[in-house]
């Protein structure tokens, strides 16, 4: 009878130890994932520059790939950013979705164009709640910004 009690005690201890380890691993995994998202805030400008470069200088498919990845990064960062930083990220997402829409229009994918321009407009309505922004407005703004960036690069290589 004493052997059964000892074995039962050891079994309970082992199960408790394993359960404790799993809880610690799960907690650390979530902490490290959040740390990665926060640390990525410092590299956002570089990601945006590279995505814009792919969008403006490569084929529409390469631009779509780069901008889609940028949108994913921005969405993750938005979740962990502080209030002021979050507003900037939301504005960057508006431009990213608009550029994605433009790239999909170039690739002749009307469904994806509409999905992305709708995302941009929905977010713009939240960020700029005091202003009525139309599809034409947002496309015009982004195209003007893009032209300005291209001219700046030509004049300052």
Image (cartoon, helix red, strand yellow):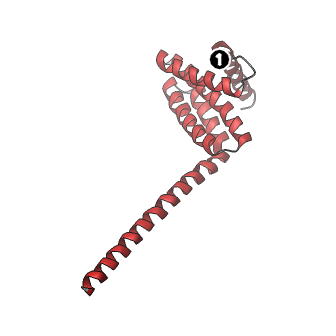
On the question of residue 29 being in view, the answer is yes
Residue labelled with disc 1: 139
Q: Quadrant of residue 123?
A: top right
Query: Position of 57 compared to 147: left or right?
Result: left
Front residue of this view, candidates 31 and 8: 8
Seen as rendered, the residue at the extreme bottom is 2
Residue at 40 percent across and 70 percent down: it is 16
Q: How many marks?
A: 1
x then y, percent, for residue 119: 57, 24
Q: Residues within 10 Å of mark 1 (few under 14, many from 20)?
A: some
Front residue of this view, candidates 10 and 122: 10
Label 1's element? helix
Residue at 58 percent across and 27 percent down: it is 55
In the figure, 1 relative to 108: above or below? below
x then y, percent, for residue 146: 68, 23
x then y, percent, for residue 26: 47, 58
Query: Position of 103 compared to 23: left or right?
Result: right
Residue at 63 percent across and 51 percent down: it is 39
Front residue of this view, candidates 13 and 27: 13
In the figure, 133 relative to 61: above or below? above
Front residue of this view, candidates 43 and 98: 98
In the figure, 128 relative to 47: above or below? above
On the question of residue 108 being in view, the answer is no
Q: Quadrant of residue 120?
A: top right
Residue at 52 percent across and 54 percent down: it is 30
Q: Quadrant of residue 71?
A: top right
Query: Position of 141 compared to 62: left or right?
Result: right
Q: What quarter of the picture does the C terminus occupy?
A: top right
Query: Position of 6 compared to 149: left or right?
Result: left
Q: What quarter of the picture does the N terminus occupy?
A: bottom left
């Amino acid at each position: 009878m004493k052997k059964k009690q000892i074995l039962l005690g050891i079994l309970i201890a082992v199960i408790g130890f394993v359960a404790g380890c799993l809880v610690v691993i799960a907690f650390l995994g979530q902490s490290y994932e959040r740390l990665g998202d926060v640390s990525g805030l410092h590299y956002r400008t570089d990601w945006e520059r590279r995505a814009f470069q792919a969008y403006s200088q490569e084929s529409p498919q390469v631009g779509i790939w780069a901008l889609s990845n940028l949108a994913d990064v921005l969405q993750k960062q938005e979740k962990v950013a502080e209030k002021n930083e979050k507003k900037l990220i939301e504005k960057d997402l508006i431009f990213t979705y608009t550029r994605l829409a433009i790239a999909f229009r170039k690739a002749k994918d009307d469904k994806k164009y509409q999905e992305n321009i709708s995302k941009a407009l929905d977010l713009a309505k939240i960020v700029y709640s005091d202003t009525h922004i139309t599809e034409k407005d947002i496309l015009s703004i982004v195209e003007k910004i893009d032209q300005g960036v291209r001219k700046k690069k030509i004049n300052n290589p």
